[in-house]
Image (tube, rainbow, N blue to C red):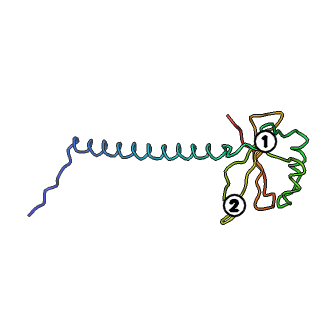
Amino acid sequence: MRRQKLRRTPRRRSYYWLAAGWVLALASFGLDMGQWFKAEAAAQKDLCQEVTQSTAVLSREQLAKLLAIPERSEKKTVREIVETPYCTLPHLEVRAGVQAVREAYPLAFDPDTWLVVLYEGEEYAGYGFSVQN
């Protein structure tokens, strides 16, 4: 007996392409939504938890001195330069099992830019800049 080949009709092929298109569209939509939620979470992490000194700003001179301090110096070394922060930010876990405290200082010459100082315990662990919009 001879087997007959089943031929796919063009109509059936178009259904496959349509289904594949829907799957790709839904997958890309899901990926875009994931990126949106990550961006929202990143924006939320730089919101003040508590304003400690509403008039605190960081001058150019203070910024220059602070940037010269090596990481892992004592916290009191940094506090001799910057004193009380504008606000505290939510804690982070930069290294596994170590809570990092963050304090924000608006720049006197650019109030929309904050210097964020990071402490791990009583050690200065570094800094970063955060642009507020």
Is the residue under label 2 in contact with that under label 1 (CB below 8 Å)?
no
**Of the residues shown, which amino acid type is indicated by label 2?**
Gln
| Spot occupied by residue 36 in the image (x, y as percentages of width and height) | 53, 42
Q: Which residue is mark 2?
A: 99
Residue at the extreme left of the image, as rendered? 1
Q: Residue at horizontal 27%, vertical 41%?
A: 14
Query: What distance separates the C-alpha of mark 1 from that of mark 2?
Result: 23 Å
Q: Residue at horizontal 84%, vertical 40%?
A: 58
**Circle 2 crowding by C-alpha within 10 Å: few under 14, some 14–19, many from 20:** some
**Circle 1 crowding by C-alpha within 10 Å: few under 14, some 14–19, many from 20:** few
Q: Which mark is residue 5?
A: none
Q: Which residue is mark 1?
A: 53
**Of the residues shown, which amino acid type is indicated by label 1?**
Gln
Q: Residue at horizontal 68%, vertical 59%?
A: 94
| Spot occupied by residue 129 in the image (x, y as percentages of width and height) | 75, 44
Which numbered disc, 1 or 2, marks the residue closer to the eye? 1
Q: Which comes sooner in the sequence, label 1 or label 2?
A: 1
- Nearest the viewer among 65 and 102 is 102
Q: Is residue 90 left or right of residue 83?
A: left
Q: Is residue 75 left or right of residue 133?
A: right
- Nearest the viewer among 42 and 18 is 42
| Spot occupied by residue 33 in the image (x, y as percentages of width and height) | 48, 44
Q: Is residue 59 left or right of residue 96?
A: right
Q: Residue at horizontal 58%, vertical 46%?
A: 41
The secondary structure type at the circle numbered 1 is loop
Quarter that holds the C terminus: top right
| Spot occupied by residue 16 in the image (x, y as percentages of width and height) | 28, 46
Q: Quadrant of residue 4?
A: bottom left
